[in-house]
Image (cartoon, rainbow, N blue to C red):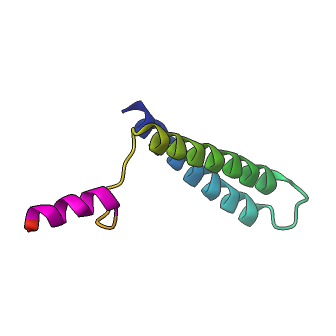
Amino acid sequence: MWLKVIIVVLFLAVLASLSSALVFLLKDTGNQSKRTLYALGIRITLASLLLISIFYGLYTGQLGSRAPWDGPRAEQKSQVEQ
């Protein structure tokens, strides 16, 4: 449960960092400020943490996929229909 909350919080933080970088880019047009660069660096860090947490959840089994093309679930469905 906590892993899903962490993933949602990291995703929202990535969106906030990306939007702040856009605001900095639009406001600092003639300025030599590096706020946009720092905001995008934070976004990359947050996105990396997001991917690591998703891979951790998949590896430990806390997260799963219910896509119809996944092997075991598709085989179970075809056995039930027969």
Task: Identify which residue is drawn at 24% across, 62% down.
Answer: 75
Q: Is residue 29 left or right of residue 6?
A: right
Quick one: 38 or 67, which is closer to the camera?
67
Q: Which residue in the rendered view is the most extreme toward the top?
A: 2
Question: Quick one: quadrant of the N terminus?
Answer: top left
Task: Identify which residue is drawn at 69% across, 57% down.
Answer: 21
Q: Which residue in the rendered view is the most extreme toward the right?
A: 32
Q: How many labels, in total?
A: 0
Task: Identify which residue is drawn at 59% across, 50% down.
Answer: 14
Task: Identify which residue is drawn at 71% across, 46% down.
Answer: 42
Is 6 magenta? The answer is no
Question: Which SS type dominates the magenta stretch?
Answer: helix
Instruction: State the image coordinates of residue 80 (x, y, percent, origin top left).
Output: 10, 61
Instruction: State the image coordinates of residue 73 (x, y, percent, origin top left).
Output: 26, 57
When the figure is inspected, residue 78 is found, relative to residue 76, above or below; the finding is: below
Q: Is residue 43 left or right of residue 8?
A: right
Instruction: State the image coordinates of residue 18 (x, y, percent, origin top left).
Output: 63, 57
Q: Is residue 2 left or right of residue 25?
A: left
Q: Is residue 12 left or right of residue 82?
A: right
Q: Which residues are magenta?
A: 70-80
Quick one: 66 or 18, which is closer to the camera?
66
Quick one: 47 or 24, which is closer to the camera?
47
Instruction: State the image coordinates of residue 64 (x, y, percent, origin top left).
Output: 37, 48
Question: Quick one: quadrant of the C terminus?
Answer: bottom left
